[in-house]
Amino acid sequence: MSEIFRAQVDIDLRVNGEQVAARVIAGQHVIDFLREELGLTGAHASCEHGVCGACTIRVNGQAVRGCLMLAAQLDGAEVWTVEGLSDNNTIRDLQDAFVARNALQCGFCTPGMLVSAEELLAQGGIPERGKIREHMSGNYCRCTGYEAIVDAIETVARQRAGKANS
């Protein structure tokens, strides 16, 4: 491994609302930092190419792939994982809708799906089903198909807009 990737970098960031100071290896990916150093194992390392979405987290308000970003890039960042979004009830309605609509089976992709779905719903309004599909297209699920996932997200969008029965 190149010496530059063995160099260590000090970072200060907020993770799930808590201040974190850490020394990371310059070439360490965010997903590995979160899982191995902080014990936040909700997001999964899978394809390691940014294609499947299993490692999706939120950095400075945007959903990002934790396998494509280096931990050293997090200096000064605000990071939210599925654990934090769950603990502060940001995604409670999405979690409930995924269960009610049977939008999860093995659950491997679910954390990334929830973070991506929350990013879409945070824009407000009731997105059309095509827009939901497009937004979620970077998150792969090998178990459920996608109809139930789209149903769950649309249900929450309607509930948040006060149009649950529309």
Image: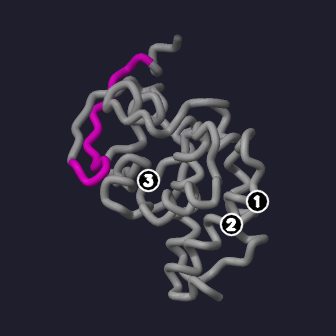
Q: Answer with left or right where residue 130 lies relative to residue 5.
A: right
**Which residue occupies the foreground of this view, 119 or 50?**
119
Of circles 2 and 3, the one toward us is 2
Pick the quarter of the image with the C terminus: bottom right
Disc 1 crowd rating (10 Å Cα; few below 14, some 14-19, many 20+) is few
* Identity, as a three-letter code, of the amino acid under mark 1: Glu
Q: Which residue is at 70% across, 41% downward? A: 51
52 is higher (above) or lower (below) than 64: above
- N-terminal label among 2 and 3: 3
- Which residue is tagged 2? 151
**Which residue occupies the foreground of this view, 4 or 121?**
121
**How far separated are the C-alphas under marks 2 and 1?**
6 Å
**How far separated are the C-alphas under marks 2 and 3?**
26 Å
**How far separated are the C-alphas under marks 3 and 1?**
28 Å
* Identity, as a three-letter code, of the amino acid under mark 3: Val
Q: Which residue is at 74% across, 39% downward? A: 142
Are discs 2 and 1 less than 8 Å apart at CB?
A: yes
Q: Which residues are magenta?
A: 6-18
Q: Answer with left or right where residue 2 lies relative to residue 16.
A: right
- Which residue is tagged 3? 59
- Which residue is tagged 1? 147
**Which residue occupies the foreground of this view, 163 or 23?**
163
* Identity, as a three-letter code, of the amino acid under mark 2: Asp
- Location of residue 132 by image quarter: bottom right
40 is higher (above) or lower (below) than 119: above
Disc 3 crowd rating (10 Å Cα; few below 14, some 14-19, many 20+) is some
Magenta stretch: dominant secondary structure: strand
Query: In the image, residue 20 lies at what x, y percent?
Result: 23, 41
Secondary structure under the numbered disc 1 in the rendered image: helix
